[in-house]
Amino acid sequence: MITRNSLYRRLLTWLLLPMLALGGLMLFQAWIDARQTADRAFDRLLEAATLAIAEQVQWQDDRLWLDLPPAALEMLATDAEERVFYALYDNRGRFVTGNAELPGASDEAIAADGGLLYRDIQWRGMALREGIRRTRLEDWRQRERFDVRVAHTQEGRERLASQLLRGNLAYILGMALLAAATMVIAIRTALAPLTRLRRAIRARDPRTLAPLELPLPRELAELRETLNELLARMRRVRANQERFIGDASHQLRTPLAGLSARAELALRQDDPAQWRQALIAMQETSTRTSRLAMQLLSLTRLDNPEYRPQLAPVALDGIARQAVKQHWSACHRDGIDLGLETPQNTVEVQGLDWQLEEALGNLIDNARRYGAHRITVRVTEAPPMLEVEDDGPGIPEAKRLLMLRPFHRGSDDPDGSGLGLAIVDGIARTHGARLGLADGHDGQGLKVTLSFPGDPP
Amino acid sequence: MKALLLLFTLLLPLTATAQVVHYPAASGTERPEPLIVQGALDVANVRPLLDDFHRRHPHVELTYRNLDTLPLYRRFLATPDEADVLISSAMPWQYRLVNDGHAQPLDTPASRDWPAWARWRHELFAFTFEPIVMVVRRELVERYGQPDSHDELLAILRDHHDALRNRIVTYDPERSGAGYTYAIEESRLSPRYWDLVTALGNVDTALVDTTGEMLEGLASGRYWIGYNLLGSYARRVVDANPDLEMVVPDDYTLVIQRLAFMPRQAPHPRSAQRFLDYLISEAGQGVIAGQTTLGAIHPELSGPGTADAWRAEHSNALRPLSLGPGLLATLDNLKRQALLTRWRREFEREDGTP
């Protein structure tokens, strides 16, 4: 389930990483808090010790005098057995007594802290916390100012701080575990509908195109709707295909049934002239049927969306000339005037010559079949265009789109397959060309236009 | 620094006559481990310990130098990289050195198990238990009875101050660190101490520097009462001399302890650790209990020669100096001046009481 690129992992990472950062921040804050709390607690000792010493400072023999109370030093050393230092300085900063010459502080710093200053110092390689009390003698005549400075090492503070931190650490770790567990459960719950959707799709009959019906959260419901739309399109495509196959088999069955009936009829007779007549008729029918099969084949190929033929430069006027040459005799037999209009220059487009020839053939055939007297094949240069115009009955504008569907015929014509325009439409799409149906000259007949994209070859 | 050192080597013979005991490494030892111990602990008491230690570690080349407490302190400050282990009964001075960061910690099973009241930071270790006692002569007991407490001593001094003139001896608090320490502790324990000082002054008490001098005078019959002697030294002399009697006052008896530590700059830290660990081991403490008069304090030991035995006999009276920063107050210059001034004043005052 957890692969390199899983949603689960991605969610987990992006939720857990910020939480880790947050946890780190909380830990740092807890450490600072623990230090501050420990400092506050132990600074009270410095305060009490300086006070106890300051109370014993007197004026005696014309100098500052101190009867050092041992308890003042005892209170600075807790169970952690801190090293203890003290000193008394007079108002000119001269050392009066003490066991260490502790550094002083500026007047401003002490005044800012109300006559009592705590700070961390480095002294002889030891990290000490120093407390400085600046006060005066409360004598009637003598109001001399003096400093009491005491300091101790920080083992007790560190011990208390680490105790506090340990307490907080357990709390933070517990919270983190709870949050992580909640997060994992939440992600699993949130991703569960996805699994349900997957199972629903997998469990389906592969042949069915029925829409998916299962309750899903909104985001996934959109995905379900999109899938259902795709399925609906596939259903339409399949319906089209089924109808096409039905139509095609119907179209093939009719001439084949005719052939079979004709052969049966001919076999009952003994006259070779009759046989010959039947064979000629059968040959005509089979030719038409094979043409129908050819057309069906090319239409299927053209309808295949995977079909992407390699286009090559072809000369439109050459193709038009070739098509006119092929159909001229047939038209001449029917008394139809087949004409050709080409520009002086060769018009080249990207295309497949055999397809374009077939398209032109189909159009000329159609025009001939539907009773035109005059057919003009026209090639224009700019834009590159193939045009076939006739003066037949034409197609009313409302029906023109219908004409592009396979097996739809304009009128009852036993010879027409109803595939001609559909094939031309498929060829146009293969070439990226636009198929246009319009009225012919003077509102008579039909003009079919294939406009190719205007890019130079 | 060099000049100071030179000065010291010149002055040293005048200020202190150092007794040196030397144990060469056992013959055949490829790389002897030197060990230099400096102590304020008389050779008679330290020798059994050194013997036993050297028997256990014959490859150690052991040098023991015996000094008085204050010369020991000054010598250490002048040359902090000379000694591997420092032993002294001057508790405030030893404490001050360790408080100032001159010691290195000892981390061994023995040091972790050592009772908390007898160590500080695993750097400073108390390894003996030595009450401060009085020694009286037979003549005094026969005439005036034996003073069993400070109160009785004060009464005897007041009642017979003419007879006892020049017959009393005690420490001079000005010259002796031990005397000063006892004076400040006693003045803290009871305000009546000053009456005693006045009484001592009225009988022209002799003031000397060491317990040894007091014992000498007592043994020769010059003094009848010695006040504030180191019990560990007095025991040996009293046991050998039927004319002398050791008195442990039953109102209060100060107890001092020898403190040992390894200097941070000890030249041979490995052998230093070995020796300090030995001092607080059951073996070392057993030697202290059995062969010295110092008093062992190892919690596993009991019976004669241990703190346990002292407590069983005098539990209410024993007042050991607490091993803590309060000792620093003892060393405060102004406090020392104030105490000595008062002591001198009280000592020279005429006693008003009849």
Image (cartoon, rainbow, N blue to C red):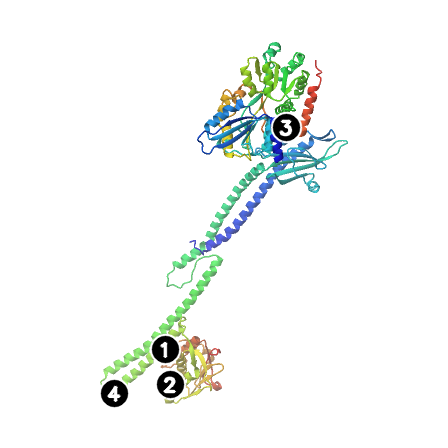
Q: Are marks 4 and 3 in contact (CB under 8 Å)?
A: no
Is residue A388 rendered to the left or right of residue B150? left
Which residue carries the number 4 mark? A273
Dot 4 alpha-carbon crowd within 10 angstroms: few under 14, some 14 to 19, many 20 or more: few
Residue B258 horizontal/vertical position (percent): 56, 26
Which residue carries the number 3 mark? B330
Residue A151 horizontal/vertical position (percent): 63, 36
Q: Give the CA separation, mark 2 to mark 4.
A: 32 Å
Q: Chain of mark 4?
A: A
Q: Secondary structure at mark 4?
A: helix
Name the kind of residue labelled 3 in the image.
Thr
Is residue B125 rendered to the left or right of residue A298? right
Is residue B56 rendered to the left or right of residue B86? left
Q: Quadrant of the N terminus of chain A?
A: bottom left
Let me know if marks 1 and 4 both belong to one chain.
yes
Let me know if marks 2 and 4 both belong to one chain.
yes
Let me know if marks 3 and 1 both belong to one chain.
no
Residue A362 lies, with reference to residue A17, above or below; the image says: below
Q: Which mark is residue B152?
A: none
Residue depicted at x 67% and y 37%: A132
Q: Give the CA separation, mark 1 to mark 2.
A: 18 Å
Residue B122, picture quadrant: top right
Q: Which mark is residue A326?
A: 2
Residue A353 horizontal/vertical position (percent): 40, 80
Q: Which mark is residue A295?
A: 1
Foreground tag (1 vs 4):
1
Foreground tag (2 vs 3):
3
Residue A335 lies, with reference to residue A214, above or below; the image says: below
Q: A92 or B119: which is nearer to us?
A: A92
